[in-house]
Structures are given as C-alpha cells and as structure tokens.
Amino acid sequence: MNFALKTLDPARLISEKTDALLVLLTNDFKPGKDALSVLVARVLKAGDLSAKAGQMLDIYRPQGLACTRLLLLHVGEGAATDVRKAVSAAFGLLKPSKSKGLTLLFLNQPAAQALRVAVTTLADASYAYTATKTKAEARSLEKADVVVPDESALRTDFERATAAVAGIELAKEWGNRPANHATPTHLAGVAQALAELPKIKCDVLGPKEVAKLGMGAFQAVAQGSDEPLRFIVLRYNGASKSTAPVVLVGKGITFDSGGISIKPAAEMDEMKFDMCGAASVLGVFRALAELQPGINVVGLIPACENLPSGRSVKPGDVVTSMGGQTIEILNTDAEGRLVLCDALTYAERFKPQAVVDIATLTGACVIALGAVRSGMFTTNQALSAALVRAGESSQDLCWPMPLDDDYAEGLKSSFADVANVGGRPGGAITAAKFLQRFTDKFPWAHLDIAGTAWKSGAAKGATGRPVGLLVDYLMALDTRGKQA
C-alpha cells in the first residue's frame, strides 16, 4: 500500500478525483469560501453532523466535489484515540466498495501523533491476509493521500509512520502464517532477505553451532520436533563500531503444543502466534531499513517448535543453560523463558547499552492487562521511562510491572539452580524474574505481549505489536550520544 503526504489548496482539492474523501473535522474548524468548507458548514448548521468526537456523515457523489464519496468525521479536539476510532469506522463503511484509492484530509493541522495514528490505522483496517488462500480477496486499497495544511512540518513523522507500517505488516504476515508455512527455517529465510536491505546483516546458526555454544535450555525445547532449530542474528549498523548497540531478543516458538505438558486442544491453533516476538523483531528491522537512524541494533531470534515426542524434554529434567545455570523443567509449556535465557546470555557479547526481550510469554499477563497494554518489566528506571514514552507516542501501549525479589521465591528448586515455573500466582512476574537471572551484565527490559500480539474470535489475526513501540524507542536514541 502506498501513502503520500500532500498539501493541497482547498479549491484544487474539490477537483481531485478519488474513490473517497475522508474529512477529519475538529472543534477548531472555521469555514472558508471553498465549496468543501461551505458544505461542511451547512452540514454542521443543519445538525446533520454533531460537533463531537465519533460522529460521521457519509455523502454519495456530493455536489461540487469530484470524489465519489465524502465522509465527514468529527474527531473533537483531534486526540489520537478519536482519530483512530474515526478512521477505523470510516474504512469499515468503505470496505465493501473495494475502493482502490482514497484521500484523508485534515482540515486543521493535526498533531504529529494524530497523523501517525491515522496512517497506521488505515493500514491496519485495510490489511488482508492471502498467503495460504487460493481464492483470497487481496487488499483493495492501493493508495492513500494524506492531506494537511502544512506537510513540511509533518514530513518526519509521516515517514516514521509509513516505515512502522512496513514493519508492522511484515510482523503481521509472518505471525498469521500457519506453523507449517512459518517454520524456524522460514523465519531464517525472512531474516536473510532483510539482509539485502541497506545496513542490515544476518547470520543464521543451526543445531551444531547452537550445541557448540552450550545453549542447553534452547536445545531442550527444540529436541522434541523434527524441524531443526535456528538461531538468527540480525545486525543494523547505522553508527560507528564503537557505539554500543541495543539488542532486541524475540521469542520464536513457531508452534507451541506445550510439549509433554500438552495444552488443551481448544484454540491450540493460536499457538502459531507464539513467534510474534520474533516477528516483531523482523518488523523492526524492516522499519530500520526505511528510516536509517544513526544507531546500532542487534536482533536475536531463537526459533524452534515445542512438540511432544519420544525425544522431548520431560517434566523434572534438568538442563544447563549457556550461562552455566542449571534449570529444573517442571513444566515443558513454560518453554519461552528457556529459549530466551540462552539468547540473553548470547547478547552479552555485544556489550549492549540495553537489551529488550519481546515474548508471548504468559497467559497470566493476559489476565493482568488484557489486550490493551503489553506488560513491561525492568528495574532500570531510565529504560522503563523510555519504553513508556515510546508506547505513548506510538499508541502501542505498555505498562510497568513489578519485579520484587520476593516473587522469585517460587522458582527455588531442590535439584537445580532454578525451576522454570513458580506456580500460578503472579505468573507473568515470576516468568520475568526467571529471565532476570540472565541479565546481570546489561540494562534489560522484558515485554510480555501475550495479550497484545494477536486477536482471537472473528477478528483472529496478528496485530504487529509492539513494532510501533520499539521503533519509537529506537528512534529516540538516534542522536549522537543519547543513552537508553
């Protein structure tokens, strides 16, 4: 899908041919003398469109305008949340008409966040999955012109929004693919394709290399599957070699049956989404290739399947992690933390300024925060503040969660240095406490996206979160000297 940012004179705008003209009105609207402003003023005066957020009026072939349909959308003060709701609702009306092009007009100069939300919402609403369908209806919308009074003031924010869309849609595409079409080998292929873009490099390690590194926890999860594991290392080099990178670690369980501790059959198909952390890392690198910030970023993706077989790791088994800690595996369905702990140890070699892991880690986080905010765990206040700010600016929200040492009590083991589960109470926190044991050598944060990475029900599908959050976090470091 192609976006373009424009400044058009109102008199010229009315002669622009488009399938649909979506006009966003705020409380600051003051009518001019052009045909569109006059029409809007008449509609408001007649009461056909209430002057409050959420109101919409659909006009077919409006007199004096070249557009096929005119949708007037009132967004109140122009807050990002109201813009998102308005654009989503408007495209819901337009979708059956299969419009190929539309124009989104802000009559008043929007805030940067409102503009970005409009772009990402329109992309999300028009997205269509087709990869494994023989008679799929592909996305009909091919082009969207975004029109503002002064495009030069918003050019940077627009470019960040379109880059984020590219990354979000890559993450959604691979999150949505069935597990047999998104194996660890497939994910490695996506990463290698990204390495064809500017400033990106990729290395892929297989079972022999992983064994040589001593990644016993990662290997234990993978050993029950016939699909070979892959450890993917992506590098974006936008700054000098002396600049410490940010490392992103994405959980890449391409299908999670739970292993020997097998999950219930109902909704197990959704466990293809257990690699959405990995997909978000791939998406971030896609966005970095567009934005070309002056930073260094490393992406680590431990990718494998978690399946039951005669080779599978068993409850009660003890394995040794790459860092040398022994782990008693009390529940094989708590596998994400096992692959992540070895990846976190591997991250040490980059001497990072910060490490952020992203994982669909616990159902407990879904209970705690639902689908609105991702859980964010860190004891580093600067990193916490930076991630919260990025969540707010991108409207890809997160929420700080506790990491008190008392939560680690349940992870004690009689037979190993640590157990991989600590009971049901505070499950999202005890999972984070497990990961924290492997992060002594760098500032670290954990994003639990189990509630935000995909939707269930009729709208089932990957969301592409938290690509937007991570892109904003990284772009805030694009200075020559800021730290995480």
Image: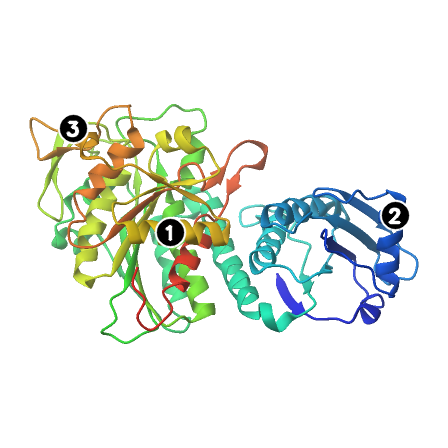
**Looking at the image, is 242 positioned above or below residue 224?**
below
Sequence-wise first label, 1 or 2: 2
Residue 245 versus residue 253: which sits nearer the camera?
245
Residue 301 seen anywhere in this rendered image of the structure: no
The residue tagged with tag 1: helix, strand or loop?
A: helix
The residue positioned farthest toward the bottom in the image shown: 240
Q: Position of residue 112 (x, y in %)?
A: 57, 60
CA separation in Å, label 3 and label 2: 65 Å
Q: Amino acid at mark 3?
A: Glu
As helix, strand or loop, the secondary structure at mark 3 comes to: helix
Q: Earlier in the sequence, mark 3 or mark 2?
A: 2
Compared across the picture, whether 153 is left or right of 167 comes to right
Relative height, residue 100 to residue 308 (above, below): below
- Other residues around mark 3 within 10 Å, as few (<14) / some (14–19) / many (≥20): few
Marks 1 and 3, the one that precedes in the sequence: 1
Instruction: Tell me the tag on residue 45.
Output: 2
Residue depicted at x 69% and y 54%: 140
Left or right for 307, reference 162: left
370 above or below 4? Answer: above
Say which amino acid is labelled 1: Leu
Question: Residue 387's mark?
Answer: 1
Real-space Cα separation, disc 1 to disc 3, in angstroms: 28 Å
- Is 153 or 217 nearer to us in this picture? 153
Pointer 3: what residue? 409
x 15%, y 51%: residue: 211
Residue 402: x percent and y percent?
29, 36
